[in-house]
Image: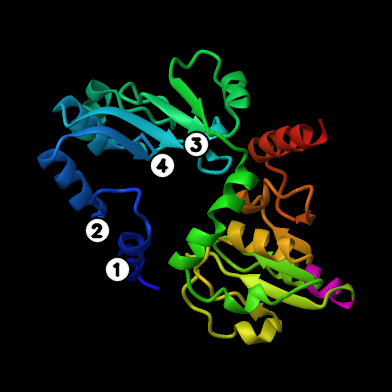
Amino acid sequence: MDAGTFYERVKKYDNTWSEVLFFPGRFQVYRYIFCHHACNLFVELDATFFFGVLHSLGCFKNMFMFEEGFGNYRTDRYGKPSHGLKKLIDRLTGVSLLAGESKFLTGEYLYLPDLYKSIFPNLNKDIRTFNKPFVAHLQDEIPFFLKLSDGYEDFLSLKDKRIGIYLTSHHIDSKFIDAIKKDSPSLDLMYIKLHPHIKNIDGLEQYQLKIIRSNIMIEFLLLILLNNGNKLTIYHDNSTSVIWFQDLIVNKNLGQRYEEYERVASYIRALKNK
C-alpha cells in the first residue's frame, strides 16, 4: 500500500477530523503551516530547524511531541548537528539537539510520564498522559487499523500455534536467523518481518522463513496473534515494538545491551509485576 492509498482510507474511515490533508514531503508540510497558522501541532520530533523558524514567525501556538516507543526517554537522542548560518538560526530560535528540549515545545503525551520526569527532572514541559495503558489502547484500536491495512488476513485464522517472528533492524543479521532456526523444532511457524528500510528482498528464500508482507503495525499483529491463543517467540534487536509485550511473549532480545532501552524495558516489567 502506498501513502496515497493510506490517505484515502483515513479520509474514508476516520471521522475524527473535519479535514485530512496529504503532502508528498516534509517541505510541503512546512509551507502549509507557514501559509495556514496552527493553534496546536503534534509531532514526533521537535529538534527541527524549520519548526524553530516557523515558531519565530508565529506560525503555531503550541507544539506537543507524542510517544514514540522508548525514543522519548532517551538521553542520547539528538537531532542532526547544524553548521554555519543554520546553527546560528537554531540557537536564536531555540532548537535543541536533544529531543524534547526545544524552547518552543509545549509538552509531550507519554505512556510513562513518571519515568520521563525521573529522567528529566529539570525539564519544564507540560507532560500529559493517555487515558489507557498502551496495550489496552491498542486493543481498542484494532478494528479501525484493520481497515487501514493490507496483508494481515491470513493471520486472523492462526490459532493456538507456536510462532517465531524475527523483527529485523535496518539489515538482516545471520545470528538472528541461526537462533530462530535452532528453535525451529519447538515452533509451528517461523516468520521474518522486514524493517521498512529493507527494500531488496532478493535471496530471502534462502532463510526458509515466511515473510510478513502486511503493512499493519507489528504491534497490532502481535496482539491479534496473542488474542487468538498463539504462543509467540520474538527475536529482535532492542525493538520498541515488543517493549510492551514482554510479559506476554518469549522475549529474545539478541541485540547488544543498550542501557537506554533496558531502562524503559525494566520499568515496564516492574509496572506489570505490581
The residue positioned 69% from the left and 81% from the top of the image is: 207
Separation (CA) of disc 4 from disc 2 = 17 Å
Nearer to us in this view, 46 or 20: 20
Separation (CA) of disc 1 from disc 4 = 21 Å
Amino acid marked by disc 4: Glu
Residue at which label 2 appears: 22
Nearer to us in this view, 184 or 80: 184
Separation (CA) of disc 3 from disc 1 = 30 Å
Tag 1 and tag 2, C-beta contact below 8 Å:
yes
Q: Identify the main secondary structure in magenta.
A: helix
Separation (CA) of disc 4 from disc 3 = 12 Å
Residue 195 against residue 65 in the figure, above or below:
below
Query: Which mark is first along the chain, 4 or 1?
Result: 1
Separation (CA) of disc 2 from disc 3 = 28 Å
In this rendering, does residue 33 appear at all? Answer: yes
| Horizontal and vertical percent position of residue 138 | 58, 50
Residue at which label 4 appears: 44
Q: Nearer the viewer, mark 3 or mark 1?
A: 1
The residue positioned 19% from the left and 33% from the top of the image is: 54
Where are the magenta residues, as a range?
Answer: 179-185
Element on which disc 2 rests: loop
In this rendering, does residue 74 appear at all? Answer: no
Residue at which label 3 appears: 77
Query: Which mark is first along the chain, 3 or 2?
Result: 2
